Image (tube, grey):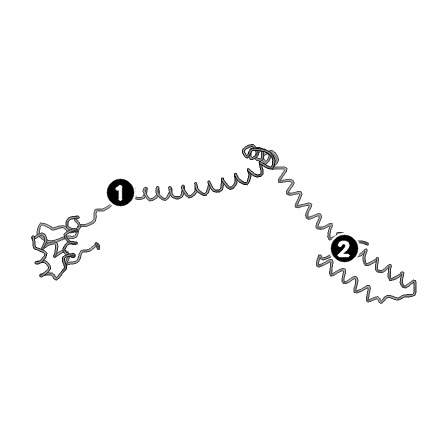
């Protein structure tokens, strides 16, 4: 029912309080029996009341007490907390089961039980975590040094190849065969381009 009753509904209530019949109410107010029955139900539920002057009134809803509001809030929060706790428990179970399956296979490879394996792994990490951190830092330093060395090796190899070509050209010149200087220039430029693009393959290179 709406928060405000219509004037027709209030009038029906007044006529019902006067013991008017459905036929009398229908004839005077031009409403159907269902509407009259609905108003009667409202009166039985206390939604519509009759005052001392015989006038129908819409009963005001009871104001919520502080205790009532507190109870409602607690109920809502408790329900939400239960839903979240259940969701977290399901996710935790799924994650734990996944981790257990993974590490069980690792433990089997070493011929150990999963509990023994996990305990040993945690003890190892606790004992050597500082050394592991140091090792990771050294790996980064080593990678930087290796990259620098590789670049130096590329440059050195480039020069060796170029000087080798020059020696061949001098050998041919000593036999009376001339080699255009442009050949040397183009070859050196090609080596420089390879060096810059990083396409020079050091493995298996023959000098």
Mark 1 falls on what kind of element?
helix
| Rendering quarter of residue 178 | bottom right
1 and 2 marks in contact (CB < 8 Å): no
Residue occupying the far right of the picture = 175
Question: Where residue 145 sits in the image (x, y, percent)?
Answer: 71, 47
Q: Horizontal and vertical percent for residue 143?
A: 68, 47
**In this view, 13 is above or below 114:** below
Badge 1: how crowded within 10 Å, few (<14), some, or many (20+)?
A: few
As displayed, is residue 204 above or below residue 126?
below
Residue at 74%, 55% in the rendered image? 201
Residue 55 shown left or right of residue 90 in the figure: left
Name the image quarter holding residue 91.
top left
Q: Nearer the viewer, residue 88 or 193?
A: 88
Dividing the picture into quarters, in which one does residue 38 lie? Answer: bottom left
Q: Quadrant of the image for the N terminus?
A: bottom left
Q: Along the horizontal axis of the image, is 125 left or right of 170?
A: left
Q: Position of residue 45 (x, y in %)?
A: 17, 48
Q: Residues within 10 Å of mark 2 (few under 14, many from 20)?
A: some
Q: Give whichever of 102, 138 is nearer the camera.
A: 102
Q: Report the side of 176 relative to 141 (left or right).
A: right
Q: Residue at x 19, y 55 (%)?
A: 4
Label drawn at residue 155? 2
Residue of label 1:
68
Dot 2 falls on a residue whose secondary structure is helix
Mark pair 1, 2: CA separation: 84 Å
């Amino acid at each position: 029912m709406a928060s405000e009753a219509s004037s027709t509904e209030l009038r029906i209530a007044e006529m019902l309080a006067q013991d008017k019949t459905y036929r009398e109410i229908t004839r005077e107010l031009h409403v159907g029996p269902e509407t009259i029955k609905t108003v009667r139900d409202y009166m039985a539920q206390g939604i519509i009341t009759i005052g001392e002057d015989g006038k129908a009134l819409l009963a005001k809803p009871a104001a919520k007490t502080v205790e009532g509001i507190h109870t409602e809030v607690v109920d809502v929060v408790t329900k939400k907390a239960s839903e979240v706790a259940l969701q977290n428990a399901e996710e935790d179970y799924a994650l734990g089961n996944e981790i257990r399956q993974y590490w069980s296979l690792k433990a089997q490879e070493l011929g150990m039980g999963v509990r023994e394996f996990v305990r040993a792994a945690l003890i190892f990490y606790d004992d050597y975590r500082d050394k592991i951190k140091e090792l990771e830092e050294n790996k980064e330093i080593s990678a930087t040094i290796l990259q620098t060395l590789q670049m130096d090796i590329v440059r050195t190899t480039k020069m060796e190849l170029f000087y080798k070509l020059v020696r061949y050209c001098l050998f041919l010149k000593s036999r009376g065969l001339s080699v255009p200087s442009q050949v040397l220039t183009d070859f050196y430029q090609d080596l420089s381009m390879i060096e810059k693009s990083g396409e020079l393959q050091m493995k298996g290179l023959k000098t």
